[in-house]
Image: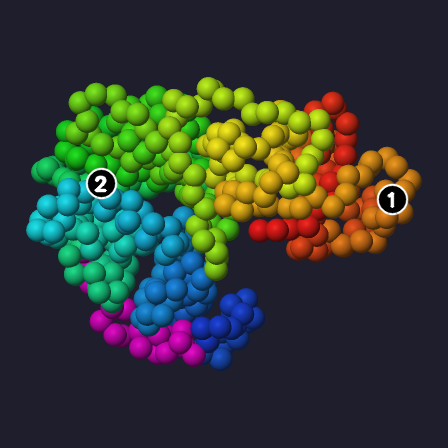
Amino acid sequence: MAVDTRIMGHYSKERALVEAHLTEDVVALALKANRFPGVDFPWVLRQISGYQAIRRKLPSWYAQKGLEFPSSLPLEQCSSELTAHHKSRLVSEYLPAAALSQGNLHGADLTGGLGVDAWSISPLFSDYDYVERQEELCRLAEANLTLLGRKNIRIIHQSAADYLQKAGALDFVFLDPSRRDEKGRKVSFLSDCEPDVLQLLPLLREKSCLVLLKLAPMLDITRTLRQLPETVEVQVVAVDNECRELLFLLDCRAADRLRPICRNINCRTHKPVQQFDFFFDEMGLFSPEMTPRPKVWLYEPNVALMKSGGHLLVARQYGLAKLHPNSHLYTSDNLQTDFPGRIFRLRELLNPAGKETRHRLAGGSYSVCVRNFPDNADEIRKKYRLKEDSGQFLFATTLLDGRRVLLSCERYS
């Protein structure tokens, strides 16, 4: 790999500018380029943009001076520090305890990218290979991971398929295939990703014990399970109720078809993690109780549960009734404080067409949520001249008998 002068310290002026202007508006700073003659100012702007992009996403990286960043796409696609550490914990649960204590495990990341997942997972292994087909990303990863203290990572400029063809036995392989085609459009089928995991499956089965796949959240879980029969665990990972990752863990050592478990995880800022687990063969065995009217408490499952379909099983566990087959809102008279989602106390049930409703809501402050209702949130805000409020909520939904209603609620958690 060619030596880059930026790593050798010849970009000292540029790096000093990055540190001096780290928090400035990049667009405004770009207009001042003529004030900094004799420096690679586009490079400076890219590094400032990179640091600003990872400030909350990767706080440990943000605290490290001297990192270098590529174009914006790898920054957008990389894992956050929180989800990267989550994957590391997941992998550690499935690695043999004896081998972990002896420190003689060999793992590989076949889609290295920015290197965040390799940075987080590699401490579990004595040897870890970062594999990436883009030479520029390899160069950056070698410099950045060294600065970040990861000395057991070997940087390999190669495609995933070529690496697997030549590799010996591996204890673990991680893949985060690109979910965009050659024109930059998002794709939603496993076979459309790059690299094609389905084509790599025979090699993965031959070379590795465990395989962890980070896939697009929009992927159909049931279809993907049929394509990946070695799956032992599926995780739907959300951060503050935003679905971020869909993880498939494959055990290539299993001789028989496995009974995969689904773990629905919502990591929340400054709040306990919400988690609900179920087995996929439980799906379809239970239909929740329906109720004609909402009760004292209203429950909205988090996005991880909605993605996996586990919200139906949650209703059984917590003794909740559903308002309508298509509304995905649940209710109870008794408060279930550990429900994996948002909880609201019902204050009032309103008729959307009633004159009294318009009078009572006009100019009020609510967060508007639409669940199985013909109007969207903006139309409802405009109709009742509503302002935004993070504590008071207005749910527009449909009840079991087909009536359209507005549920005025107060947020509990």
N-term mark: 1 or 2: 2
Residue 46, percent from left and from top: 42, 64
Which quadrant of the figure contains the N terminus?
A: bottom left
Q: Residue at x 39, y 26 (%)?
A: 280
Would residue 351 be visible to someone looking at this image?
yes
Q: Amino acid at mark 1?
A: Arg
Nearer to us in this view, 238 or 272: 272
Colour scheme of the picture: rainbow
Would residue 131 be visible to someone looking at this image?
no
Horizontally, residue 150 falls left or right of residue 378, namely: left
Q: Residue at x 41, y 48 (%)?
A: 77
- Marks 1 and 2, how far apart in space? 57 Å
Q: Residue at x 66, y 55 (%)?
A: 390
Q: Which residue is mark 1?
A: 358
Q: Residue at x 25, y 51 (%)?
A: 121
Residue 324, percent from left and from top: 65, 27
Q: Amino acid at mark 2?
A: Tyr
Nearer to us in this view, 299 or 230: 299
Say what secondary structure mark 1 lies in. helix
Magenta range: 1-20
Q: Is residue 356 magenta?
A: no
Disc sitting over residue 122 in the figure? none
Horizontally, residue 367 falls left or right of residue 308, namely: right
Q: Quadrant of residue 391?
A: bottom right
Count of marks overlaid on the render = 2
Label 1 close to label 2 by CB (< 8 Å): no
Q: Is residue 4 magenta?
A: yes
| Above/below status of 408 relative to 254 | below
Q: Which residue is mark 2?
A: 94
Nearer to us in this view, 332 or 204: 332
